Image (tube, rainbow, N blue to C red):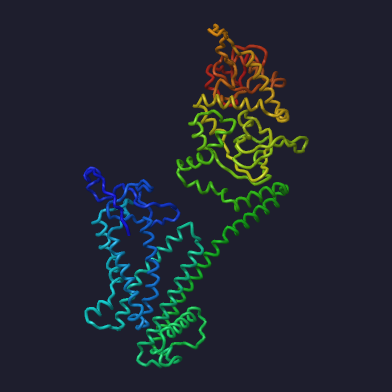
């Protein structure tokens, strides 16, 4: 195992570290490339920065999440598997403990002895502050003061070899077999290993859990079989044992013959098969068999419970989908909904369960707003910048807007916007395609097709009129939804951006197809009025000629254009008569919807253009006179006379 050899900072410790315990910000010496593979036991501390240019830990200190140290821990897990098999085996078969397995045990013990030394150099996370502690004396004190250190030492010492060195004899007594069982303390490493794998999304949780259950079962079967054979070897009458009645002189027979009989008895007992060919004969064996069968009840319940949970977990989404479909079918049947609506509901539900992207709101809802905004910026900023309405706006506006949008998926042939519904949102197509449809005399008429980075629903929202068209998804489509109220609140303080947006919107209206304009008489009237206002209100001042003899034009300003003079101004309805005469005039004049201009003078000029006469007074419906236009609200009725 190699350590970080980078020298410490030349700045004195007194200037960079508190006299309190060393719980300070440090950088990692390791690099985590897949955070999904990191369990809570080795998660980097708060204040730890991970990356290629990270500042190193103190010299001879190992980060617990260092990739090399994790590989070392994984290698030790393999050795633990050997220890878990060898310890009960050597208890039952003494010749193996002092024969061919002895040098293997010494090599394995040597690796764990090295790990004990390494542990004195591994930094740890303080549980109260969650900061990385890397001071050597604190690492050593924590390790020695816990139970882990004496148990690690006891499970590593080769007691049989030490006894042989001291006495000069090889002792095969049962005491050394039981001392070897201390190596089972190492099994905690296997438990931690499976815990990490269960949290690692690169591995299937089902198969990880399944392998863990198999390992638990094999260890229980192996340990019970070896201990049962050990009971037979120590009984005073070998023929009065469970194996002696079937295999005479079994103590002198092959080790693997005895191991095969032991595993056969253990598995048949665990499986509750009970053939009866191998059974307890003496009292000691009967007592052990009783406890083993009681243990098997709990083990079997544990295995069945876990397997049931794994199987149900894989099918829970299927059951949820079936229940949801049945609820939709029941709802559509009771309310006698049309077949087309039922198909749309079922298509959306099926897509919800089959498409992971539809669950993104559930994924993002628990994240901080800053992270959600960064995700939206990464995914949709380019789309917003290339949409006609937002071309040329400032970066600040895009950044603020992108944090307010909501992404949605729609399956094919689903109505996203319905004709004549109240406008509350407008949409931008991110991927896929939608059809723009209108209804004439009860029949559908196709108008146009919209693709990526095109917008719909904007006309109804900006003019505050019922949506003029139905918009239907042509294929699986992702759209982002922008709420009208959020959009208006965002634009109001950004006047320059508002002017750009309105100019883009007017330019878009002028580029609409004649078929679309024919469905919106209000828009055609608005464009005609806009053209006449621009012609009447444009003032051209011809300046002096320059040295090249060219005329210079200045101050070409549309002074009375309400659309371009403010940022999404309030919309009001104006009437050209006294509010006291409403009853006599309402039948022939329903009012005009305009955007509120900046000044009273501009307001009276617009009214003169609309009604052909110039008024001097602006009043509310109750007769109160308006002196400040800023006090007006959306959809107020105003009377000019």
Residue situated in front as seen by the camera: 415 or 190: 190
- Residue 8 appears at what percent x and percent y? 26, 48
Location of the C terminus by quadrant is top right
List the single residue furthest toward the top.
544
Residue situated in front as seen by the camera: 584 or 240: 240
How many callouts does the rendering have? Answer: 0
Q: Say left or right for 192 vs 134.
A: right
Q: Say left or right for 473 vs 49.
A: right
- Residue occupying image coordinates x 49% and y 81%: 268
List the single residue furthest toward the front.
548
Q: Is residue 164 visible?
A: yes
- Residue 456 appears at what percent x and percent y? 63, 35
Up-down relation of residue 124 to residue 244 (above or below): above
Location of the N terminus by quadrant is bottom left
Residue situated in front as seen by the camera: 618 or 515: 515
Q: Is residue 541 visible?
A: no
Residue situated in front as seen by the camera: 559 or 83: 83
Up-down relation of residue 410 to residue 385 (above or below): below
- Residue occupying image coordinates x 45% and y 81%: 263
Q: Quadrant of residue 160?
A: bottom left
Q: Quadrant of residue 447?
A: top right
- Residue 178 appears at what percent x and percent y? 32, 78
- Residue 609 appears at what percent x and percent y? 65, 15
Q: Say left or right for 544 vs 578.
A: left
- Residue occupying image coordinates x 61% and y 13%: 537
Up-down relation of residue 391 to residue 276 (above or below): above
């Amino acid at each position: 195992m190699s350590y970080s050899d980078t020298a410490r900072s030349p700045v004195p410790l007194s200037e960079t570290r508190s006299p309190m315990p060393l719980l300070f910000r440090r950088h990692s010496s390791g690099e985590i490339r897949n955070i999904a593979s990191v369990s809570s036991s080795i998660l980097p501390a708060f204040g730890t920065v991970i990356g290629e240019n990270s500042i190193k830990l103190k010299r001879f200190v190992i980060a617990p999440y260092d990739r090399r140290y994790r590989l070392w821990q994984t290698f030790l897990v393999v050795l633990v598997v050997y220890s878990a098999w060898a310890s009960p085996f050597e208890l039952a078969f003494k010749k193996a403990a002092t024969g061919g397995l002895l040098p293997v045990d010494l090599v394995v013990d040597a690796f764990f002895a090295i790990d004990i030394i390494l542990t004195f150099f591994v930094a740890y996370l303080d549980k109260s502050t969650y900061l990385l502690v890397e001071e050597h004396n604190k690492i050593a004190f924590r390790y020695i003061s816990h139970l882990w250190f004496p148990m690690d030492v006891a499970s590593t010492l080769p007691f049989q070899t030490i006894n042989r060195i001291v006495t000069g004899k090889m002792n095969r007594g049962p005491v050394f077999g039981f001392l070897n069982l201390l190596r089972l303390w190492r099994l905690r490493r296997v438990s931690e290993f499976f815990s990490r794998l269960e949290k690692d999304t690169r591995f299937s949780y089902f198969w990880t859990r399944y392998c863990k259950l198999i390992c638990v079962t094999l260890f229980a079967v192996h340990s019970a079989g070896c201990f049962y054979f050990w009971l037979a070897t120590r009984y005073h009458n070998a023929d009065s044992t469970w194996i002696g009645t079937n295999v005479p002189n079994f103590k002198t027979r092959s080790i693997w013959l005895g191991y095969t009989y032991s595993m056969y008895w253990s598995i048949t007992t665990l499986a509750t098969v009970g053939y009866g060919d191998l059974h307890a004969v003496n009292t000691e064996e009967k007592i052990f068999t009783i406890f083993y069968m009681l243990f098997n009840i709990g083990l079997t319940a544990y295995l069945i419970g876990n397997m049931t949970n794994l199987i149900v977990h894989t099918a829970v989404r299927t059951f949820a989908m079936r229940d949801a479909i049945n609820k939709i079918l029941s709802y559509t049947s009771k309310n006698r909904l049309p077949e087309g609506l039922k198909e749309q509901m079922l298509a959306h539900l099926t897509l919800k369960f089959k498409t992971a992207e539809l669950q993104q709101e559930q994924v993002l809802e628990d994240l901080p707003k800053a992270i959600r905004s960064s995700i939206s910026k990464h995914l949709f900023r380019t789309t917003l910048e290339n949409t006609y309405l937002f071309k040329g706006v400032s970066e600040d506006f895009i950044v603020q807007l992108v944090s307010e949008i909501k992404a949605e998926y729609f399956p094919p042939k689903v109505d996203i916007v319905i004709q004549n519904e109240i406008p509350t949102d407008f949409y931008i197509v991110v991927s896929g395609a939608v059809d723009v449809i209108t209804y004439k005399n009860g029949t559908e008429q196709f108008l146009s097709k919209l693709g990526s980075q095109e917008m719909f629903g904007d006309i109804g929202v900006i003019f505050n009129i019922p949506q003029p068209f139905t918009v239907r998804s042509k294929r699986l489509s992702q759209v982002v939804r922008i709420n009208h109220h959020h959009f208006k609140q965002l634009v109001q303080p950004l006047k320059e951006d508002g002017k750009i947006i309105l100019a883009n919107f007017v330019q878009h209206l002028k580029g609409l197809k004649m078929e679309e304009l024919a469905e919106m008489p209000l828009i055609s009237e608005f464009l005609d009025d806009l053209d006449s206002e621009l012609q009447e209100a444009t003032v051209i001042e011809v300046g002096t000629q320059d040295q090249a003899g060219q005329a210079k034009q200045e101050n070409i300003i549309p002074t009375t254009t309400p659309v371009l003079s403010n940022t999404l101004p309030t919309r009001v309805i104006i009437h050209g008569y006294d509010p006291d005469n409403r009853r006599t005039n309402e039948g022939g004049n329903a009012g005009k919807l305009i955007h509120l201009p900046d000044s009273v003078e501009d307001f009276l000029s617009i009214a003169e253009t609309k009604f052909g006469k110039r008024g001097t007074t602006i009043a509310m419906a109750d007769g109160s006179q308006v002196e400040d236009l800023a006090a007006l609200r959306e959809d107020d009725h105003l009377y000019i006379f």
